[in-house]
Image (cartoon, grey):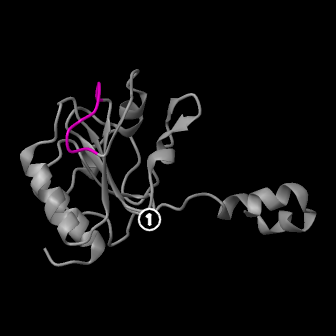
Amino acid sequence: AVLSLSLSQPFVGPLYHWRTSRPHEYAASPLNAVGDDNAAFDAGPGHGAPPRNIALGSGDFLLDHLDHRFALLLANDAADLPAALMAVLDELRQRGVPLQVIVVGAQGAVAGAGLSLPDTDGHLRRRHGLRSGGAYLLRPDQHVCARWIALDARRLRDAVLNACGLKR
């Protein structure tokens, strides 16, 4: 709103400062996962950083698909999600945790995922350091909570419960 108003009202300009208008990285947040693979990644945003807003197509960007829930960005080539992952997702949802599953780079719909996003040239995966089976967990404020080279359902569960302040 401030940005829009600053285009037409000169008094707003001083309220908008480039240093305070960028996303902040919460690298030391207690909401970040302990025991994920954050340190093993050679690319992509780390703990507490916002995800990269990758163009998926003309006028379509990654952040357009995120909402107020936790988001699991999963690089998956299979036609459905693993049973262990589905069990953990069901458990978390039964505990009231809002969670969306977004599969990146699948050739079509993936059973168990809420959304499949194209990544035909692999750009999204490369910019986030993802290989097949890897994943990012984004908090509802759209910052990285955890990331895994190979997603393990138990560690996903632990990361979500930690970020929610719930007992494991």
| Residue placed furthest toward the top | 121
Check disc 1 and give the amino acid type.
Answer: Tyr
Q: Is-magenta flag for residue 108? A: yes
Q: Which residues are magenta?
A: 106-113
Q: Quadrant of the C terminus?
A: bottom left
Find residue 59 and report its horizontal and vertical position in percent: 59, 33
Left or right for 35, reference 137: left
Give the left or right position of residue 118, taking residue 81 as reference. right
Give percent across and percent down for residue 71.
Answer: 34, 54
Question: Residue drawn at (26%, 63%), measured in percent from left and top?
Answer: 33
**Magenta region, main secondary structure:** loop
Q: Residue at x 61, y 57 (%)?
A: 22
Q: Which residue shows up at 42% across the image and 28% down it?
A: 123
Residue at which label 1 appears: 26
Considering depth in this image, is 3 or 150 the residue closer to the camera?
3
Q: Quadrant of the N terminus?
A: bottom right
Q: Nearer the viewer, residue 92 or 35?
A: 92
How many badges with numbers are in the image?
A: 1
Residue 44, position as x, y percentages in the image: 39, 42
